[in-house]
Structures are given as C-alpha cells and as structure tokens.
Image (spheres, rainbow, N blue to C red):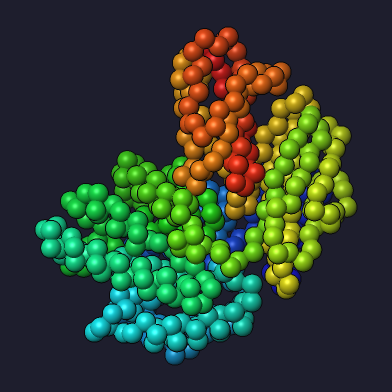
Amino acid sequence: MSLYYRKALSLLLLLVTITSSASYAAPKKKILFIGNSITYFNDMPRIFRDIANQKGDSVDLTMYAPGGTGFQHHYIDPAVFHHFREGGWEVIVLQPGSSESVGVPPTQPRALTLQQARVLIDSALHYNPCARILFYEISYGVFGSTAAQVTQYNTTMDNIRTTAGYLADSTGLSFAPAGEAFRYVWNQDPSVLLWQAPGDIHPNIKGSYMASCVFYASIFHKPSAGNTIYNGNTIADAQYYQRVADSIVLRYPGRWRIDTNWHRARFSHTADQLTVQLHNQSEGYDSLKWFLPGSAPKTTAQVNYTFNQAGTYILQLVAYFGACSDTLTQEVSLSGAGGTSIQSSGSHSLQVQLYPNPVNQMLQLQLPASLRRFNVQLRDAGGRLLQEVRNCDRLNMDGRVPGLYVIRITDQESGRQFYGKVLKR
C-alpha cells in the first residue's frame, strides 16, 4: 500500500477510535486530467471537483490541458510525464485530440493513437500502479439542424464512440461517455446548443456542466443528481443534465467498460436491532480487513458484530488486490428496536428520496438511474411488514392509519439498501 493510502487510512482509523458517532470525512482522492481546450473550457474539471466535494467525495484535482493538443503531443511532452512522476494519483483522465477521437481519414489513424496512448498509460502506471485510467469520449460540434447536418453529426459521433471503445478494449480501460450525453440531449432537441457556437467544438457552460456530471458518475459510480453546483445554468437545466448524465453512465456501465477490469471493494449488510451481519461481495481479492469501532480488524469474508448500544457507527472494508487496495466505508445507524439506516460514504451508495413527506395518498420514490432490479418494503414503526413490491417506484398510502412508517429498498443486484421514514397524515 502506498504511503498516501497508509496515511489516509491511519487518519480514518484514529477518528473512528475517538468516537463512533463522528461524521465520516473521506480522504481526498487525487485525480489528474490530461487534455486540451475541450477539457479546460469553462474549467470543467473544477465543476466536477465542486460537485464531488458537495456530494461528500473529496477531490484533490490537477489539470494539464494545453490548447490544440492530443495524444500525439502528450506522449512526447515532458510536463505530462512530470505529472505522472508526482505519484499518488488514484484516477487519471486522458483526453484524445478531436481529430484523434474521430479516427477516420483524413484524421489520425486509430492504431497510431493507440500506440501513443500506450506510452502514456505505461508511464502513468509505472509511477501510479494502482491508478484507474479512463479516456474522455468528447463530443464533436454541430453545424446546424437540417436533416443532413443531423446525420453528419451522428455519423461523426459514431466514429468518436468507436474510437473510445477501441482504445478501451485495446488497453483494458474504460471511458467516460460525455459525447453520448451531448448526443442524446441534442438529438432530443436540436435547438439546445451545448457548444460555444455552431461549428465550434468547444462546449459552453451547459455542455461543460453535463460533462462534469458524466465524470462524477463515471468515477464515483454514483448519481450526480441532487447537487446544487449549477455553474451558471438554470436550476431546471442543471437538474436535467444531471439526470441525463446519470442515466447514460449508470444504466449502461458495460457499454463504457466502466471498471470492467478494475477491482472494487463491495459488501452488503443485514441488521437485527444491535447486531449487524456484513457480507463481503468483493471478487478477485487476495485478503480483506474489516474495521469496526471498538474491535480489532477482522479478516473473514462474513462478519457478525453486536454493538453495545444504539447509535451511528462507521464500518469499513478494505479489499487487497496484489499491491493495490480498494476501500468502501459505510455509516450505519442502529436504533436497537429493529430499525436501521445505512448510507455509503464510498462509491456505492444508494441514494433515494421519498416525497411528498408527510404523505396523504401516493408516495413517490425518486430512485437512481442505476437501479434496475429492486424490492420495496413498507413496515410500521414496530417493524411489522405491511407490503412488499418489486421494481415499483411508488406506494399507495391511501387508507393507511396515520402515523410513522419505515421504507426499505434493496438493490437486488448489489445488495445495497436504503432505509427511510415517512409520515402518513
């Protein structure tokens, strides 16, 4: 484990030892963007950083993006390799140039772009062996909204997506599908301009904002929805771009090869009053360590642990994969009377909103776009199961006795759970 990771983990364990009810502050994740003006226009990485910080995923960000460059420049640029040698990067984003992204004559051949990308990747991993590297799938500009111009744009975007997939498949990496988000919005309404002007490939504040949401969802595997960093956009526009980015990234991660070849720590839980059962779901790991308040680290795949009293506790799993590791931290609240709530502070939280609350008739569940198979349980305040439905985002509360009810939503694919309370008038 690198010195950076050891220091971050030591600090976290110290905080857990001091108090089990203190709020969890994630160590900063070092992220490097290498690109050109498409990356730096409107300071897109900064918007991404601000969204991540507001969502509780602390980011230490560096951007190197000289205008008019691509892999053909970066792979011989000493400044790029200086950044790699700095070390400690957990995520590195590589943006090809626009002609490299299109990848068909008379632009640069894809095979040559791949050759230059390999030089960058080999150097990046030499100094940062545990870094996740992903490519930036850019969006091309538009020249108008006639039928011919729409066809031209979509043909160009097909080529860009093919290049991104070719680079990802050839290197075992993934890509952030910003271009697909642009394409979706513009095809839905060609009057919405996401670029500086027709014929300009550079994004405007709308495009840069949506790209930042795509990167948040791609890197942290969580929806960007709910953040209030609007960066000059209207609230309605910003929330729409959040939903588009989340849906495209999180509904179809396999299309973008997101973490296909990267190991991640995963675990699910069940709870009964003060006892928590933790179930490791990581794959391909060499060893595990569970860190629980007031207990020595545990190394078994499954853990049963009983707390002395009700409260909010921080639970952490570190999965080791060779010289690398991945950490998932969750904050669990135990009532001691059959009620629990859990929120992930790592990259796998299940974020759900219940509204209206209090409710008279129909309760709406605002679910993340990544949730495909799930079940919903309605329980009374004493924990008695009243109703259970599958893959339904609403519950009819009409006819229920006024009072407090508990909602439990379980993701059938990952085991993640959400607990919430709703008041019936």
Residue 21 makes an appearance in the image? no
> Which residue occupies 63% across, 52% down?
346
Question: Horizontally, is 164 left or right of 57 in the view?
Answer: left
The N terminus lies in quadrant: bottom right
Residue depicted at 45% across the width and 61% down the height: 255
> Percent position (x, y) of residue 100?
33, 79
Which quadrant of the figure has residue 299? Answer: bottom right
Q: Is residue 412 visible?
A: yes
Marker count (numbered): 0
The image shows residue 225 at horizontal and vertical percentages of 45, 44
89 w.r.t. 48: above or below: below
Q: Is residue 206 above or below residue 79?
A: above
Q: Is residue 316 above or below residue 324?
A: above
Left or right of 37 in this view: 14 = right
Percent across and percent down for residue 238 are 35, 46
Locate residue 120 relative to residue 178 in the image: left or right.
right
User: Residue 272, position in %: x, y?
Assistant: 78, 31
Write the residue at 18% across / 51% down. 191
Instruction: Name the residue at 24% across, 63% down.
Output: 154
